[in-house]
């Protein structure tokens, strides 16, 4: 029986070592180590800075969004209601608020959108002002309140 490779198998070992590596050196998965202590500190600092920037971004985005709080409502008759609410917004911001009236089955029986621009300084309490909005209804309402507010600018 004849063979083209030597009996010791060194030629096939060389071919395999060239193809897959010897298990030594920078290519080896066994010799790979994780980040050093300094590397972990740098990773932690970068993660902390990015987290802080994300929180600041979220807080600034929330502070400029208008916010409405229902104060009271009054049902005058089956066709007319009023909603009183506090609106917190930037003084130069123009905001539209949707006010809805609901019946006992929570169906919408009235809707009114009101746009509120600059408010007189004597009507402000900080950034908050109080508003009364009439809502016409198709039948008697059980509750009336602000559905949502959004910035027009």
Image (cartoon, rainbow, N blue to C red):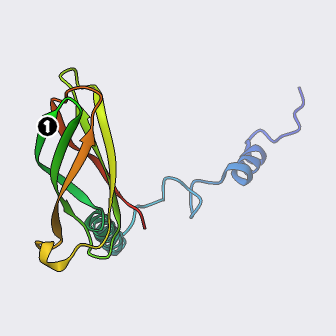
Q: Is residue 87 left or right of residue 118?
A: left
Work out whether 100 lies above or below 59. Answer: above
Q: Is residue 40 visible?
A: no
In which quarter of the view is residue 63 placed? Answer: bottom left
Furthest-bottom residue in view?
Answer: 121
The residue at 20%/76% (across/down) is 120
Q: Residues within 10 Å of mark 1 (few under 14, many from 20)?
A: few
Residue drawn at 27 percent across, 61 percent down: 66
Q: Quadrant of the C terminus?
A: bottom left
User: In the shown orientation, is residue 127 left or right of residue 90?
Assistant: left
Percent across and percent down for residue 118 are: 29, 73
**Residue 18 versus residue 100 in the image, above or below:** below
How many labels sit on residues? 1
Residue 32 visible within the image: yes
For the N terminus, the quadrant is top right
Q: Name the element at disc 1.
A: strand
Give the camera-side residue of 76 and 93: 76
Identified at 29% across, 30% down, the residue is 109
What residue did someone put label 1 on?
76
Q: Quadrant of residue 151?
A: bottom left
Residue lying at the far top of the rendered structure: 105
Q: Position of residue 142 (x, y in %)?
A: 15, 29
In the visual, does 128 lie left or right of 92?
A: left
Foreground residue among 33 and 41: 41
Measured as percent of width and height from the top left, residue 119 is found at 24, 72
Residue 78 is drawn in which quadrant? top left
Pick the residue in front: 84 or 60: 84
């Amino acid at each position: 029986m004849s063979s083209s490779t030597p009996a010791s198998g060194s030629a096939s070992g060389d071919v395999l070592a060239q193809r897959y590596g010897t298990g030594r050196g920078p290519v080896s998965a066994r010799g790979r180590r994780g980040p050093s202590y300094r590397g972990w500190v740098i990773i932690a600092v970068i993660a902390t800075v990015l987290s802080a920037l994300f929180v600041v971004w979220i807080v600034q985005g929330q502070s400029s969004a208008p916010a409405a709080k229902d104060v009271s409502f009054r049902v005058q008759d089956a066709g007319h209601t009023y909603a009183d609410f506090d609106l917190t917004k930037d003084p130069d911001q123009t905001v539209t608020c949707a006010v809805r009236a609901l019946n006992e089955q929570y169906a919408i029986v009235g809707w009114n959108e009101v746009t509120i621009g600059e408010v007189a300084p004597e009507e402000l309490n900080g950034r908050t002002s109080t508003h009364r909005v009439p809502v016409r209804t198709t039948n008697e309402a059980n509750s009336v309140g602000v559905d949502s507010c959004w910035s027009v600018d």
